[in-house]
Amino acid sequence: MADNRRVVEQYIEGRKTQDWEAVGALHHADFTSEFPQTGELIPSHDKWVAIYSRFDGGLPEEEADEVHGGSEAVHVVTPLPMVMPVITIVGSGDTFTVTGKAQYSNGDEYHIISILQLKEGKILKETLYWAAPTAAPDWRSEFVERITA
């Protein structure tokens, strides 16, 4: 059985460099990807590549920041049309969660959460959530402390 954390790290790197052949080698034969926010299921690696290679406005530039969750921190910087610093990779066994931010060339920014489920040392299912930052309501200010996310 492959080291699943390493598979996840290689998957992130392949996505950042748009190396669809390397990503395909990490996708399980039964790979699917879900976008719950838009109600879409991508049923295969080939259709996943078709979407990501034709991404409206170009794929965002991705830049990895510090990766946590293992015994070592990993730093990777990759210039592309979208910035996505990976903030954390957390998980063990067959399920990992990757959180990060994405910034598109038009300046739009999103927080991203990707849940990766592995089977037989490959990515079986990816569930991807994204949300634009929103301003906190003033009425909560007396109860919270501000963080930089």
Image (cartoon, rainbow, N blue to C red):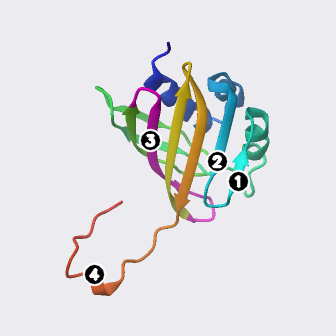
The image quadrant that residue 48 belongs to is top right
Q: Identify the residue position indicated by label 4 in the image.
A: 140
Q: Identify the residue position indicated by label 1 in the image.
A: 40
Q: Give the residue drawn at x 63%, y 65%.
A: 106
For numbered disc 1, what is the local secondary structure?
A: strand
Percent across and percent down for residue 22 are 65, 24
Residue type indicated by callout 4: Arg
Residue 29 included in the magenta stretch of the image: no
Q: Identify the residue position indicated by label 3 in the image.
A: 97
The nearer-to-camera label among 2 and 4 is 2
Residue 100 included in the magenta stretch of the image: yes
Q: Give the residue drawn at x 61%, y 60%.
A: 37
Tag 2 near tag 1, CB within 8 Å: yes
Nearest to N terminus: mark 4 or mark 3: 3
Percent across and percent down for residue 41 are 71, 48
Q: Which residues are magenta?
A: 92-108
Q: Quadrant of the C terminus?
A: bottom left
Residue type indicated by callout 1: Glu
For numbered disc 3, what is the local secondary structure?
A: strand
Nearest to N terminus: mark 2 or mark 1: 2
Tag 1 near tag 4, CB within 8 Å: no
Percent across and percent down for residue 96 are 45, 36
Mark 2–mark 4 Cα distance, whole angstroms, equals: 33 Å
The disc at residue 34 is 2
